[in-house]
Amino acid sequence: MNIHAHRRRLSTVNRLAAVALCVTAAVGFSATSASAATQAQPALTAQDHAITDVPGLVNGRELNAVTGLDGQTVNAPRLIRSESLDKITTAGAQTLADTYHVDLVIDLRTPSQVAAKPDVPIPGAQNVNISMFGADGNYSDDTVMYHDLVDKGYVDAATPGPMISAYGQILQLLATHTSGTVLIHCSHGMDRTGTVIDMLDHILGVSEADILHDYLLSNTQLGVTWATPELLQGTFESDVASKYNGMDSYLSKTIGVTSHEVSALRERFLVSNDAKAASISIGGVAVPLDAAATETGASIAFASATLTSADVKVVTEDTDATSSVTVSGQKVDVVVTAQDGATTTHYRITVAKPVLTIAQGATLAPGATVSISGSGFTPGTVYQIVVHSTPTVIGQATTAQDGSITASAALPTTLEAGAHTVFLADSSGNPVTEQLNVTVLAASATDTAASIAGPSVATGGTVIAQAPVWPMVGLGALGIALLAAIAVAYRRARRNLGS
Amino acid sequence: MTPRHQPRPASRWRRLNIVAAIAVVVASGMVVISAVFLVPHTSTMDSAPDPTDLAGNAVQFDGPGPNPSASATPSGTGRFQSPSVDLDVPLGSLDVVDNELEPPGFTSAYWVRNLGVAPSDGADGTVFVVMHSLRNGGQAPGNALIDVDNGRARISTGASIVVDDVLYKVVNTETVDKTQISHDQSVWADTPGRLVVITCLQRPDGSPSTDNMVIEAMRG
């Protein structure tokens, strides 16, 4: 009664004086003064976003932009916490709508507290009243109040009481409201609002020290010392630990926050530092991301006469991340920038033109049929098979569904012996592959060429030419005639000599 | 016969005798030489007799003879028949050896065992058949298939060829340079139901052949 009564006795005038004192103290106190008072009223830091440009707004600040889960930063402007909005001016309400984009107000007060000090409506904003204490929210003892802030009215899971029901509704609302800024408040924006923000910050992975600092900033902004570590940590969190096995278990099992809601809250209230690409493809060829993220970069084969950034498709893991593509010749640089604007990942890709293979080898006969294969082509595209030095299109090749090409073509029989190159070209004749060096053999050397497809066929023969008979017969007859002539002549000569 | 009374006739007689003896020797030599040439001399050689063609002519190979490793058999797989050109010969078989096909005989067709498929498996691939043709008037099976004077096939497209009782119809004939046929994938492709018959295209002037005749047929 007395503590709360003490609070109530602090008139608005006194409180304003206290704020003035506090600001003076914050500015004036040196770092050496480590009194209990300065700890109770910590100074605002660069990470704290107190709102000072809304007339009539008391104890107003955004979430503190501190480090949360996995090094990500809390997305401060998405939630404003404050005292009740009964004192804001019309202009202040307009500023909250226009400058701070507030479109949802969650009022945690009891119906009687709302009735006593109704909020000035913010133009265009929805107002949701979720009374954490139920009907009665007046406490004379802050410690009792902080015990109740854990589980007021809790019987069992079927009868959770107003407190746990309220936490469930609030966190669900925060997880599902994805348009403008949420403004959440109770009477002072200190206790009920404090435990709600404690839970939210816990889900976001904010450290205990930062949670306590933010909680104590209500003292700083209000110029009081009511908020204490003993209440938040020594009473509220201690009860959660002892009665409900810690905050995680309390959130998931007692309050019933789902893992889906946890993900949604983190998505909503953390600035992503995810600068990873989910996939990069160049002309449909997937880039190995791990290799591309190294200094050396990755190498892929893709058939393109002239590479442009339109060939490069980047999908980021986080949809709020952005990417930029720079193409320089056959080199592609992709930079993915995370939602936080600071975290980047650099992917380097060297795009090699596909290398062709000729099954028959690099030494070929003129007129030889060559079997060409390669990969890294755009599926369904038709390329020309070209042989240089005098550019001659010797055939066409169509890419298969997997980006590979297999084609046959005959070298011109008129191709001169010597060095030539074979490559694939687009329809304009621009090379899309590396040039493959081949040597064409002279025609006389073709028997030893590698392009043997079968045997040679020796099916020729000839009739054996018979030696002529008649000359020999004639010779024999002549010899016999000569012998006969000699015999006749010899006999006649002998008769003449004898007579 | 007293030498004292007949001095002149005696010396003249001696001269006549010498002339006659020389004439006898020359004449006898002419007879012997003609006899040696005209008498059959097969018994003087150890090697096998020259092969013969379908007409019984002794014939020989143009170039070196076939490699015995080809393990050729002149018959055994039915017959090779082409009624339109009056060809009906035994069907033997052989292997490609040292990247060359050379049948040993001049009276058979030979299917190639180590290329394509066997005639019994003709539905699954190409059956390759080779056979000799002869120049200078010889008659080997291949001569029936070639038109020497016009340098083309004598068998026409659409004509029937029966290989071991399987009917094929000629779809294409072409001449291929002998130095290029081993590089011609279109000849040696292994295609179901295909028959390729190869012989030599002889030349009108009777000089050795420089082209192969390739006859392509499909199962009818």
Image: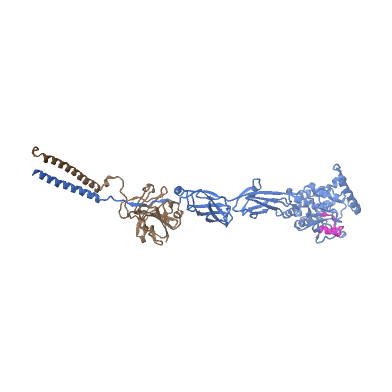
Residues rendered magenta in the picture: A81-97
Q: Which chain is brown?
A: B
Relative to A397, is A493 above or below? above
Residue B51 placement (x, y as % from top left)? 32, 50
Q: Residue extending furthest top?
A: B4
- Answer yes or no: is residue A1 visible: no
Residue A12 placement (x, y as % from top left)? 90, 54
In screen coordinates, is A92 left or right of B180? right
The figure's colour scheme reads by chain
Tell me what hue chain A is rendered in.
blue
- Answer yes or no: is residue A44 visible: yes
Numbered circles on residues, count: 0
- Residue A30 or residue B22, whichever sits in front: B22
- Residue B148 or residue A99, whichever sits in front: B148
On-image quarter of the C terminus of chain A: top left
Residue A88 in the magenta stretch? The answer is yes
Residue A380 in the magenta stretch? The answer is no
In screen coordinates, is A478 left or right of A73? left
- Residue A447 or residue B5, whichever sits in front: B5
Residue at 69% across / 49% down in the picture?
A: A345
Residue A439 placement (x, y as % from top left)? 50, 48
Residue at 12% across / 46% down in the picture?
A: A492
Residue A197 placement (x, y as % from top left)? 80, 52
